[in-house]
Amino acid sequence: MEATEDLHLITLGPLTNIAFALSKEPRLEQRIRSLVMMAGGITAGNATAAAEFNVFVDPEAAYIVFRSAIPKTMVALEPIMEGATFGEEEVKQIEAFDAPWCWMIGRLLRQRLESWKGPVSPPDPAAVGVAIDATIAKAEMLHVAIETNGEHTRGMTVVDRRRWRGKLAGTASPNVNVVMSINTARYRQLVLETLLAH
């Protein structure tokens, strides 16, 4: 609350701390200018068939954050797996660069490449990339609700993609900027330029 500049947040894990902060100080809703979340899935999950891990482990926190007035961008599993990928060429460039962070990231990506036998898509860099340059992604304002009670769907991000949404009485208003796709070439360029900067 004492910050003199606008607050822009990126979350790469469960939303517990953000929800707790909002519960303790509701005025934070007006102080946080943007929130980019690596959270949720548009159609499916990874922790369960329906729920992505970061939301699944604390759906009550996600419920609070998603219902807040903070301008939110959700970077979900599908655009990450389909567009925010690294292949052999990118991993080699990272491995060859003489910097400790490249040594670490190169080893992690190499392990994934060898175990997945194809392009890898670590989720956190995608969310950071979208936060740095939103133009690498295409997004759409949609209503997203958090399921907190379902036996099979607890932690699910329920994304309303109906073509006729908004034309039916009682339809909820869009509340989240949902990333639908990520430009692979531009994403890779952004990551490499960031990591390989002197």
Image: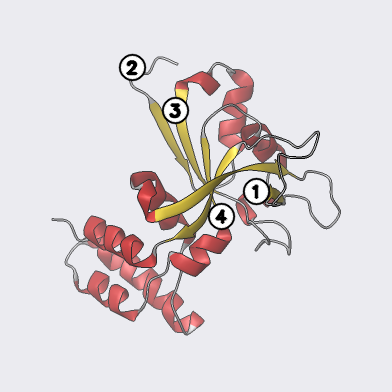
Q: Residues within 10 Å of mark 1 (few under 14, many from 20)?
A: many
Alpha carbon separation for disc pair 1 and 4? 11 Å
Indicate which label's residue lies in the foreground, 3 or 2: 3
Callout 1: helix, strand or loop?
helix
Circle nearer the N terminus (3, 1)? 3
Alpha carbon separation for disc pair 4 and 2? 31 Å
Callout 3: helix, strand or loop?
strand
Indicate which label's residue lies in the foreground, 3 or 1: 3
Alpha carbon separation for disc pair 3 and 2? 13 Å
In the image, taking residue 82 as reference, residue 153 lies left or right, namely: right
Mark 4 highlights which residue?
76
User: What's the amino acid at mark 1?
Assistant: Val
In the picture, the quarter occupied by the C terminus is: bottom left
User: What's the amino acid at mark 4?
Assistant: Ala
Give 139 or 29, whichever is nearer the viewer.
Answer: 139
Q: Horizontal and vertical percent for residue 121? A: 46, 67
Circles 3 and 1 in contact, beta carbons < 8 Å:
no
Q: Residue lying farthest left? A: 198
Circle nearer the N terminus (1, 2)? 2
Q: Where residue 55 is drawn, which disc sits there? A: 1
Alpha carbon separation for disc pair 3 and 1? 22 Å
Alpha carbon separation for disc pair 3 and 4? 20 Å
Q: Residues within 10 Å of mark 3 (few under 14, many from 20)?
A: some
Q: Where residue 33 is drawn, which disc sits there? A: 3
Circle nearer the N terminus (3, 4)? 3
Circles 3 and 4 in contact, beta carbons < 8 Å:
no
In the displayed structure, would residue 78 be above or below residue 115? above
